Image (cartoon, helix red, strand yellow):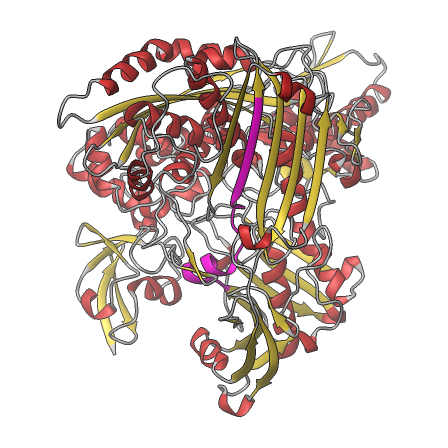
Amino acid sequence: MKFELVVNGNPVLIEGNPMDRLLDALRDKLDLMGTKEGCGEGECGACTVLMNGEPVLSCLLPLIQCEAAEIETVEGVATGEASAFLERFVSDGGVQCGACTPGIIVTAWALLRDNPHPTRQEVQAALAGNLCRCTGYEGIHRALGRGAADE
Amino acid sequence: MTLLGSSPPRPDGAAKVGGTLRFGDDLPKEGLWYGATLRSPNPHARIRGLRWNPERAPKGAVCIIADDLPGPNGVQLLDDEWPVLAEGIVRHVGEPVAVVAAATMLAARQALGAIEVDYEPLEPTLDLSAAANQESLYTLELRSGQVEQELERAHLLVEGTYHTGYQEHIYIECQVMSAWWEADDKLVVEGSMQCPYFVHRSLIHVFGLPAERSVVKATPMGGGFGGKEDFPSVIALHAALLAKACDHPVRIAYDRHEDIIGTTKRHPSVVTHRAGVDAEGRLQAMEIEVVLDGGAYRTLSPVVLSRAVLHAAGPYRCPNVHIRGRVLRTHTPPNGAFRGFGAPQVQFAMERQMDRIGRCLGLDPLEIRLRNVLEEGDKLPTGQVMDESCSARLCLEKAARETDFQERWQHLEAKRRAPIDGESMQGVGLSLYFHGAGFTGNGERVLQSVVEAALLEDGRIEVRTAAVEMGQGCDTVLPMMAAEASGLRPEDVVLAPPDTSRVPDSGPSVASRTSMVVGSEVAHVVTEIRDRILDWWSNSQESGAAHTVEDGVVRRGNGESWPFRELARRYCETEDPLVVSRQHEPPEWQVFDEETYQGVAYPTYAFGADVVEVVVDPDTLEVRPRKVTAVCEVGRVLHERLCVGQVEGGTLQALGWGLMEEVKLEAGHYLNDRLATYIIPTIKDSPEMEVHLLERPWKGGAFGAKGVGELPMDGGAPAAVSAVENATGIEIDTIPATPERLLALTSAHRQVPSGPQDPKRGRRPGG
């Protein structure tokens, strides 16, 4: 079957089975390797992408549910207006090994787009589904605590 | 201007936040086949028959069993006792019995169904109590002074037995390895690993290849924490065997479930203490027994036990100490390296024991530690005399002062005794800890690490080490150290990829040693290249020497200046290639006797003190850590942001281990074998953290840096549990302190004593 969707602003046609995971389609068919598999069962959040602006877990999402959807991956977020935030995310210590980072960037950017100055509690609520084993989350709080804008 | 201590952005940061960094499973896949592993369902069984039925497998699929190995069936670590594939007998659930490869992952999994195994179950040894009567995997003993006599004479005898559980690494990137064979029988292996030369040695051992025909390339790691120290050798061997058999490149990429059931974990431990103290609470004698569950094979357990024994008495002064250590063999998956490497287990026990001694004498956790804290001039049980870089008291006092610890602890003790119905319980706890920097004993001397630097045509200096970036920041810090030493800029230094065909063996990325050992050698070789170029330049000039180099610019006394890279480029145009290498020599005073366990086990120690504040739900007994104040003395802070990040991340791992992470086994099977059931801290579980870095540089190099990677793993769990005790009055000697365990302890009436104990009686094991 063929599925039409928009990925990072570009219309794409993906050939696959209805139950193929969006995660595999992004990685294997579109070579978007930024989206990672950490657990394959929706627990870790490493595979998070935006679907019509909302964070979703691409390891749990079959292609059939993605028809006509707008998907944004970390590669898409990184080429947009998030650049100041991304720089801060690095300099504040939000990144160590980088394996959870794409999922966290995507989720965090979705939060900041809606809420440019989230509180610590709002950050916790938004990122509750993204595991990070390196940072202890404090670097992530530092980066998000300074908000979305280039300040 | 000094670079060290500043926080320039990490060079790998942009690729990581942009999703463009390629990890092991992100590399191109053309022509790639996939490997899968058949694992034992039995904890202990004889393999009566093992049959591969290719006609039942997808076309072209290949299978490898132990009989197919071209050389010894052993993973070469300290020895080669760990089988590459089970041979005749299986000793744990999940042990690899056969590996298969096919053109797709699905086909490889289908191929597993074409293997028949006939097992004859044998009696398994499943826990430490059953293993105690059998031969140990490894034993150690360390003795100083007259322990028996002093225990007899002591004012008070305090006993305790402390248990710690497994911990699974949960690096977010699972184990992954690809292998292929090139012309002339050359093997190339590429994947996620902390120790390229460990993998290299394993491949040579099994395939009998000359060193240069085995090439190992480490990709950036999506987390390691020790979990990619030992196990990558296993998966690399599997991939290489399959690649040979099917004549395709083969990748083995574990999914999370397989990663949890198939790879090593932190050793569970039981540590028993008998301490004699005087009336003021000063330690007179300690008898400590450390027992680790090694699982089915020895792997790295002997060195884990070594570090455990050497840290078992904690950062305290005690003239008479007897420590015995044993690793026992059980029919469970082998345990191995995990951040801290034995030290977190024994320091959990020591810190709990200090709290217990304090309670027996009516002293709070700060006071009992202040009376025993290790200071300059004091001796460790190994006889090593603490030098001026000993900072235990500094850390302890700073942590207590920053948090008003004593007052808060007393206040919460009083509050607990007069609870208000329905109000959440609060507690505050303290820990003091230390961590020996670098390899244990003569490890660095045996290792003979080599670092190389070479001048590139563009005038930059290529630094060649086997250090691997796993998030800890070596790719940031090594160029900074080179720049600090040489007056060049970090960007004048380029790191060669950790590929055994391109870099010498600078040792593994473990033991908090990379900055301290590899970094100090990097500083030397880069400085030597600089000097060689300056000498050449001076000789070609009439005015002679007297150059200064700062910020990548060479200046002469007469005011002339040139960019260093320009001079280096010119050097390359006319001179022979310039390569400098250097072998690491530990300080000559670092002498350790492996027989008696006396001498200098570590050239220096980093110290830390944590204060953890918790809130405990009175109905569910759920523990929420609210704030951690961590004071860490690391010798010299090389990159402040990265150093703080190590402390924050390590501390949360320690809290996870102490409060929530639990691997349960039933008949040798892990029950929590997925991320849905093995729970690690999320951002909602993690407390606010305040990190204070202190510096007492050590004299041996690396600008005084002592190593920080593992230190924070030692302090979080005992401080958190101490806080739970302060909040609830439940006496806790076992972690993780889950609500279920706290409830069981409550039901068993395990309460802390309400006041000082009768000196003649003391406290007995098991309370």
The residue sitting at 59% across, 79% down in the picture is B63
Q: Position of residue B526 (x, y in %)?
A: 72, 29
Where does the image place residue A132, in percent across and percent down from the top left?
Answer: 37, 42
Q: Of residues A48 and B564, which is closer to you in this image?
A: A48
Q: Is residue B212 magenta?
A: no
Q: Is residue B19 above or below residue B564?
A: below
Residue projecting furthest to the front: B760
* Vertical arrangement, residue B504 with respect to residue B36, above or below: above
Return the residue nearer the eye: B231 or B591. B591
Residue B529, image x, y percentages: 76, 29
> In the image, which residues are magenta?
B253-275
Residue B473 in sight in this render: no
Tell me which residue sits at (41%, 26%) in the image.
B719
Q: Is residue A50 left or right of residue B391?
A: left
Q: Is residue B419 left or right of residue B68?
A: left
Q: In this view of the protein, can residue B430 be seen by the observer?
A: yes
Q: Residue at x 39, y 26 (%)?
A: B722
- B731 shown above or below B256: above
Q: Nearer the viewer, residue B677 or B644?
A: B677
Query: Image quadrant for the C terminus of chain B?
Result: top left
Is the N terminus of chain B in the top left, top right, bottom left or bottom right quadrant? top right
Q: At 45% across and 17% down in the image, what residue appears?
A: B758
Toward the viewer: A132 or A51? A132
